[in-house]
Image: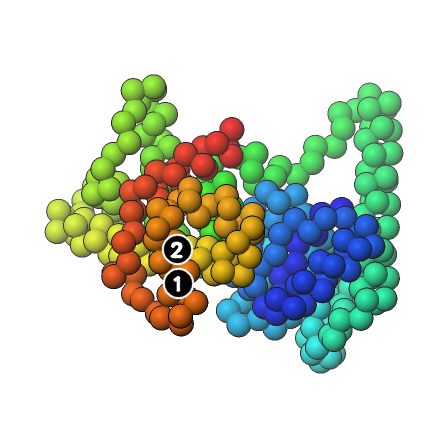
Amino acid sequence: MRYFITDDDPAVRSMLMQIIEDADLGVVAGEAEDGSQIDADYLHMKRVDILLIDLLMPNRDGIETIRQLRDFEGRIVMISQIESKEMIAEAYSLGIEYYITKPINRLEVLSVLQKVQERILLQRSIEGIQRSLSVLGGGAAREKKEQPFTEKTIQTPGKFLLTELGMIGESGSKDLLEMLGCLHREEKVAAGDYKFPSLKDIFLRVARQKLGDAASETELQKEAKAAEQRVRRAIYQALSHLASLGLTDYANPKFENYASTFFDFTEVRKRMKELEDHVESAPSTTRINAKKFIYVLYLEAKRLLG
């Protein structure tokens, strides 16, 4: 089984991961510190079977996050120290399997997760029998609900990458996803004769796509400039997120995979030093190579799209 843990307390995440791994219940495919950092597409990319999620989190709580995960086909277990019957009832009405109370009790966690695993395995077994009967009866096997990633849009792996980079909650992420779609369509039309456009052209093309052909040059320039500011703030958030991961654990897989790929490592080291010294710099004073970031994001999204 593959688990994903969402909780704003790193100690709780670490404890749950240790319980799961020590008991050989499966692997922890990833973790997040807030509900705003995950969505159904991201969990699908991670091939998550069971989501463990905290009720109270600073930006988007567990209840609201579950509402946003309507397309998630895995099972959800909620964790919280809140014992309000109304909130627990609402969580169950939204489809959670179980509710674990804090502080974390190892035996309770093991009992709950083993029950959830048993339900999943039973459901898979029943579905397998149904498919076999359908084939033997001459009928076509029941089609599974189409997964978001099979739609072959570049925005899906793009959202996955932006979530991995800790920036999906930033407004500039929407601009970046629009850019990916625009670039991908243009490359398909170019049919092998495609040259990656300049940063200015990218922002103008997306602005024109957003405002329409009737927009004046002044309106296009204004929207392009605003989008660039949003994107730079979002990229700065990704830089800060990776630097924070590197400070906590230099061998963190996300830090190793993304820091030097999306950024000049000297800037990553500089941001790590600022965080270590509790110095807060502004995005405008940080050297951010936005074109490199967008280019790498596009290539990585295309690679994941296959």
State the image coordinates of residue 147 (x, y, percent, origin top left): 61, 39
44 lies left or right of 234: right
For the residue carrying disc 1, how many other residues have a C-alpha within 10 Å: few (<14), some (14-19), or many (20+)? some
Q: Nearer the viewer, residue 19 or 269?
A: 269
Q: Quadrant of residue 101?
A: bottom right
Residue 102 vs 193, above or below: the answer is below
Q: Quadrant of residue 274?
A: bottom left
Q: Determine the residue positioned at 65% across, 49% down.
A: 29
Residue 182 vs 29, above or below: the answer is above
State the image coordinates of residue 118 (x, y, percent, origin top left): 86, 50
State the image coordinates of residue 18 (x, y, percent, origin top left): 74, 59
Residue, far top: 192
Q: Amino acid at mark 2?
A: Arg
Residue 35 vs 49, above or below: the answer is below
Residue located beneath label 2 in the image: 269
Say which element carries label 1: helix
Q: Determine the residue positioned at 34% across, 19% down.
A: 192
Q: Which mark is residue 27?
A: none
Query: Can residue 166 be spotted in the picture?
Result: no
Q: Nearer the viewer, residue 46 or 237?
A: 237
Residue located beneath label 1 in the image: 273
Q: Determine the residue positioned at 37% across, 32% down.
A: 184
Q: Amino acid at mark 1?
A: Lys
Q: Are marks 2 and 1 in contact (CB under 8 Å)?
A: yes
Q: Nearer the viewer, residue 258 or 36?
A: 258
Disc 2 to disc 1, C-alpha distance: 6 Å
